[in-house]
């Protein structure tokens, strides 16, 4: 016998066959497939004890109650909080991904000072000292009235602290970004003569006539609106969307009326005209509450006849008549306005025209209609101390201006109209109309301090940034939006240890007030923001 | 010209020789050796694939110290006294040291193992880095509550007689996957005699099919 090629073949085949019928091949196949699922470089989150902690989301005006799932104390997921008014366990996609903001690469990681075109890190002490020096200089030059502040809203203790700081410095120029809420408030004031917030009871309404509101795209109380929208079919609630664009809301509505942009008010008056001429309005309500009804009826008859409205809006007569008829015949109809997410002021004429429809049917302060609620006051501030400069400044400073008129004035004036600007939670360079003009105005302000958590379009123009904790890192009282039939005040609390060298904006203000010394420091007697919140919150 | 043909060519006309040559053609010695080599290689590879391969595949580690389950079950009553559920229904798994300290603040017995536990871990307030025999991969969602509370299952059905053990067996880890050997099971063929012999997906599916008439959907466990 000779060892030849066949012997080797036999050896090879024997080895292969032996291996094949032994468990190793099959086991190795299984193992290697598992191995591919467990690349050692793939990060695997640590396992541990699961706990939940509650807070409020302030990423939009919905202010939903949220529950944060933590593993060994590390937040891993945001969920809707059950039982919370408005969202009751629901949450939107933005809220779900809220944790991403903690590690957002555009966060300002420490106080920064602008040097030429670049930013340099600076300590909190030095940053606040520099701001204090600048403000003191402006005050000493008797220009305290030329210091302004823009925040996102007027309610809440953080805004309260900014307003107080401004007042003790010597200025009244405290502005909140405009939203549809302001325009609605003006409308309610002009029509009903009251200072009230509009609360839309969409839940109980059976006919929603929306003039361009992004009803399921972030308008009002978004999660509440999702719920209303998903139960619409069941309840038989009609949604008519009047909007030039086929938005998500329009696509979801029972009827979409593509209208010529900017002619919504004309359509609303046209509908009012039909309701009046067809005798479909609520006579009891009108006779009880309306003084100049006949004048109004004359006006719409003359200016908004159906032919004119068809020509202006580009909508067929039949359609307009149908909307008017269906709206007037519904048992709890509601007409809503505020374009998109309602984050811009919108047009006063438009909101007034739309609200007239609600008035004609008398669905004010009724289920399924518009409730007028007085803004809740829950903060009680002790009086401020003001030195001479402050008293003179406040007397001299502008009053009753809006953010847009402020920017217009800055652009118009050749001398600095505003010497210093504090900006917090507001991004006018992005969210206002005509951003080019806003940017130009921002460039003209000699000294800008931003309290933003992110390097946004407006913060880019700052000279010093005192970065704030994001909502998951801080205490704050949160006032709800007007999207619902009730007003809610929530308390947001820190659930994540601050990741960067940031502060609660309230603490930044206290620090600045202390650095400004004198009567300003005296007006801010609290050790920290938490103590301030505890002291002035009286519910 | 092939070897066989050559042999035929060179052979004499002697019939016997021709017969031999022809025999050579049939019972070729090369083929015979080939068969022997085949069998040899088959046996060697089969045996090593069966007996040697598992030894190479798994590496062994010892637990930080021995744990006597039997003694603890006797003292505490049942599994859930230590392996409890949290209020929200999630399972605590291996107790954290805080729970052990309720009894073991100081040494209770005189075993070497307890001494290690008290001196190295309790006194230093350090968690014991237990090696978990039944740790499932990260891509698996498993709810103890659904099985133990919901379906009223016994711990033993999946975990076997661990409650009877007096020492901690070595922890064997698969060098390729990084998983504990208990997932595939001790038997390298994957043959099991008891429900707790292995903890692979097929084992879950088998029981689910039996109990719920369905193997279940992918997303039930792979969320
Ligand atoms: S709707 Fe607004 S408040 Fe609610 S979860 Fe979404 S982003 Fe947050």
Image: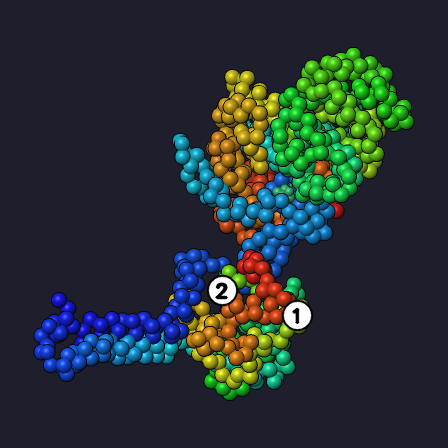
Is residue A518 visible in this depiction of the protein? no
Along the horizontal axis of the image, is A529 left or right of B56? Answer: right
**Where does ligand 1 appear, by image quarter?**
top right
Q: Is residue A502 left or right of residue B6?
A: right
Q: Nearer the viewer, residue A215 or A296?
A: A215
Q: Residue at x 16, y 81 (%)?
A: B20
Residue A426 horizontal/vertical position (percent): 58, 34
Q: Find residue A499 and name its label.
A: none
| Residue on which the image places disc 1 | B151
* Camera sees residue B35: yes
Q: Is residue B69 or residue A173 the one in the foreground?
A: B69
In the image, residue B215 lies at what x, y percent? 58, 64
Question: Can you say whether A472 is above or below B172 in the image?
Answer: above
Assign a secondary structure to mark 2: loop
Label 2 crowd bin: few (<14), some (14–19), many (20+), radius 10 Å: some
Residue at position x 35%, y 77% in the image: B46
Query: What chain does badge 1 belong to?
Result: B
Q: Residue furthest bottom?
A: B110
Residue at the outermost top position:
A302
* A238 sits left or right of B135 in the view: right
Which residue is identified by label 2?
A: B137
Mark 1 element type: loop
Q: Nearer the viewer, residue A387 or B2?
A: B2
Residue A247 location, quadrant = top right
Left or right side of A258 for A371: right
Quarter occupied by the N terminus of chain A: bottom left
């Amino acid at each position: 016998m000779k060892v030849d090629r066949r012997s080797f073949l036999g050896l090879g085949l024997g080895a292969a066959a032996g291996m094949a019928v032994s468990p190793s091949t099959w086991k190795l196949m299984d193992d290697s497939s598992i191995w591919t699922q467990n690349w050692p470089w793939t990060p695997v989150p640590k396992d541990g004890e699961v706990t939940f902690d509650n807070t409020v989301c302030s990423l939009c005006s919905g202010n939903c109650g949220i529950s944060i799932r933590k593993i060994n104390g590390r937040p891993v997921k945001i969920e809707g909080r059950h039982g919370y008014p408005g969202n009751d366990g629901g949450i939107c996609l933005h809220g779900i991904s809220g944790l991403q903001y903690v590690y957002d690469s555009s966060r300002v990681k420490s106080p920064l000072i602008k040097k030429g075109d670049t930013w340099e890190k600076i300590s909190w002490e030095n940053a606040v000292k520099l701001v204090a020096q600048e403000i003191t200089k402006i005050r000493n030059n008797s220009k305290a009235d030329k210091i302004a502040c823009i925040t996102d809203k007027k309610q809440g203790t953080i805004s309260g602290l900014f307003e107080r700081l401004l007042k003790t410095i010597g200025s009244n120029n405290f502005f909140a970004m405009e939203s549809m809420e302001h325009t609605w408030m003006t409308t309610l004031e002009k029509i009903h003569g009251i200072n009230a917030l509009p609360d839309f009871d969409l839940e109980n309404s059976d006919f929603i006539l929306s003039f361009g509101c992004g009803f399921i795209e972030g308008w009002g109380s978004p999660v509440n609106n999702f719920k209303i929208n998903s139960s619409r079919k069941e309840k038989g609630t009609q949604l008519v969307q009047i909007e030039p664009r086929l938005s998500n809301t329009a696509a979801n509505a029972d009827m979409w009326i593509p209208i010529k942009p900017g002619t919504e008010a004309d359509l609303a008056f046209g509908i009012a005209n039909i309701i009046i001429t067809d005798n479909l309005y609520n006579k009891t309500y009108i006779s009880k509450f309306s003084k100049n009804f006949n004048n109004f009826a004359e006006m719409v008859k003359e200016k908004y006849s159906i032919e004119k409205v068809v020509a202006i809006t580009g909508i067929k007569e039949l359609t307009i008549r149908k909307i008017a008829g269906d709206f007037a015949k519904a048992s709890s109809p509601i007409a809503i306005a505020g374009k998109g997410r309602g984050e811009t002021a919108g047009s006063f004429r438009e909101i007034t025209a739309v609200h007239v429809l609600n008035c004609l049917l008398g669905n004010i302060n009724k289920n399924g209609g518009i409730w007028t609620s007085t803004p809740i006051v829950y903060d009680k501030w002790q009086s401020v101390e003001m030195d001479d400069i402050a008293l003179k400044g406040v007397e001299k400073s502008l009053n009753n201006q809006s953010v847009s008129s402020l920017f217009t004035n800055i652009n118009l004036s050749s001398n600095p109209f505003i010497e210093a600007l504090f900006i917090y939670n507001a991004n006018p360079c992005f969210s206002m109309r005509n951003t080019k003009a806003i940017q130009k105005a921002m460039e003209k302000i000699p000294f800008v301090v931003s309290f933003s958590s992110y390097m946004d379009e407006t913060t880019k123009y700052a000279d010093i940034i005192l970065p704030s904790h994001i909502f998951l890192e801080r205490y704050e009282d949160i006032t709800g939006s007007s999207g619902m039939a009730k007003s809610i005040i929530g308390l947001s609390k820190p659930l994540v240890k601050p990741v960067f060298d940031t502060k609660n904006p309230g603490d930044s203000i206290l620090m600045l007030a202390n650095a400004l010394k004198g009567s300003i420091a005296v007006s801010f007697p609290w050790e920290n923001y938490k103590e301030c919140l505890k002291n002035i919150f009286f519910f | 010209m092939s070897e066989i043909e050559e042999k035929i060519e060179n052979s004499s006309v002697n019939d016997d020789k021709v017969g031999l040559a022809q025999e050579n053609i049939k019972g070729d010695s090369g083929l015979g050796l080939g068969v022997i080599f085949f069998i040899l290689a088959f046996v060697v590879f089969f045996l090593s694939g069966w007996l040697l391969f598992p030894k190479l595949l798994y590496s062994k580690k010892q637990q930080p110290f021995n744990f006597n389950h039997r003694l603890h079950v006797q003292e505490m009553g049942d599994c859930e006294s230590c392996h409890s559920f949290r209020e929200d229904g999630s399972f605590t798994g291996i107790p954290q040291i805080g729970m052990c300290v309720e009894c073991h603040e100081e040494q209770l017995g005189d075993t070497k193992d307890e001494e290690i536990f008290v001196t190295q871990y309790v006194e230093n307030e350090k968690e014991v880095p237990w090696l978990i025999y039944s740790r499932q991969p990260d891509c698996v969602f498993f709810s103890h509550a659904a099985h133990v509370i919901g379906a009223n299952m016994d711990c033993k059905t999946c975990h076997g007689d661990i409650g009877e053990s007096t020492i901690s067996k070595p922890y064997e880890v698969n060098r390729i996957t990084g998983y504990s050997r208990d997932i595939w099971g001790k038997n390298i063929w994957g043959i099991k005699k008891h429900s707790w012999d292995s903890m692979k997906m097929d084992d879950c599916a088998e029981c689910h099919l039996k109990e719920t008439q369905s193997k279940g959907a992918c997303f039930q466990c792979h969320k």
